[in-house]
Image (cartoon, rainbow, N blue to C red):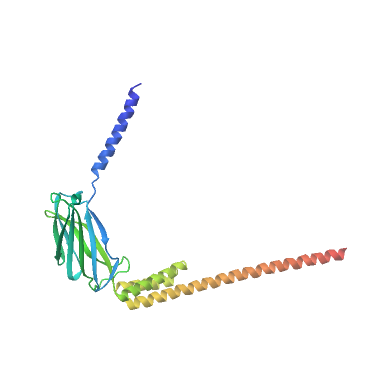
Amino acid sequence: MNSIPCSKRSVVFILLAVAVVGVVGTAAAVTVTDENVPQEVESEAETSATLTVSNLYDDAPSEWTLRAESNLTGDVTWQLSKAKFGNAGIENESGSGSSIETAVSQENDDEEITISVSGTMPNRSEYNYDPRQNLSAITLYRVSGDQQTEIGSADIEYFTENSKQARQAIESAREAIDAVGGDSEAEDTLQGAISSYDNENFGNAIRQAENAEEAAQETQQSQQTTQLLVFGGAGILVLALVGGGVWYWRNQQDDYDKLR
């Protein structure tokens, strides 16, 4: 009789042991968080980006090197702030150039690192409608010995005034085509606009997108006209049926009166 509850306790113990092993066996990685990263920046404009690196020793050695690289141009400057365990203070570092490195040490009480870069968004010749073109303002690496592992990045979309106008025209045309449930002719023209965008021919992209939107609008007007004709024809048919019914009823009444 006592063997059954004992068996239940054994099963529960085994399940708990498996659950504990599962938690211990799943180690979290170093965490990189966007603190201040703009979604888009115009080419040749100054910009900045900030990332925070935490959980520095999760799935990582107690000592390693944090390396940061940037594709920004111009006067590129870096600011690093190392928060210490137990709110024991902040250690600041700075630098300039396309990259910077700093030592990360548990023995030195490094708990969290905030890294910022400032520079100029270069004027790029590589454009892509989808996925959107972007540039890495910051790419972070964990360096340990001869191994370098990317742990996070801050990517910013770049644009020019012409590329932005072309994208907006394409998006407007897409909305118009979707609104009519699709239009093959307009869709082909829109794909041509996207191809022109990818080839940095923004003027042609705008014209093609506007033509695609006009074609979709014409299709919408045609659909509305057809609907009006259908509803109008249905209304006339109903009136005819009602009128015919009334005429038939009156004739029946006249015949009945004559018989009387």
Task: Choose between 195 and 145: the one closer to the eye.
Answer: 145
Residue placed furthest toward the top? 1
The reply, left or right, for residue 205 in relation to residue 183 is: left
Q: Give the percent coordinates (x, y) of residue 142.
A: 17, 55
The reply, left or right, for residue 116 in relation to residue 238 is: left
Question: Quarter of the image holding residue 72?
Answer: bottom left
Q: Give the percent coordinates (x, y) of residue 220.
A: 49, 71
Q: Quadrant of the N terminus?
A: top left
In the rendered image, the vertical position of residue 37 relative to residue 209, given as above or below: above
**Residue at image coords 73%, 65%:** 245
**Residue at image coords 17%, 54%:** 89
Task: Choose between 252 and 85: the one closer to the eye.
Answer: 85
Q: Quadrant of the C terminus?
A: bottom right
Task: Choose between 181 and 53: the one closer to the eye.
Answer: 53
In the rendered image, the vertical position of residue 103 relative to residue 12, given as above or below: below
Question: Quarter of the image holding residue 99?
Answer: bottom left
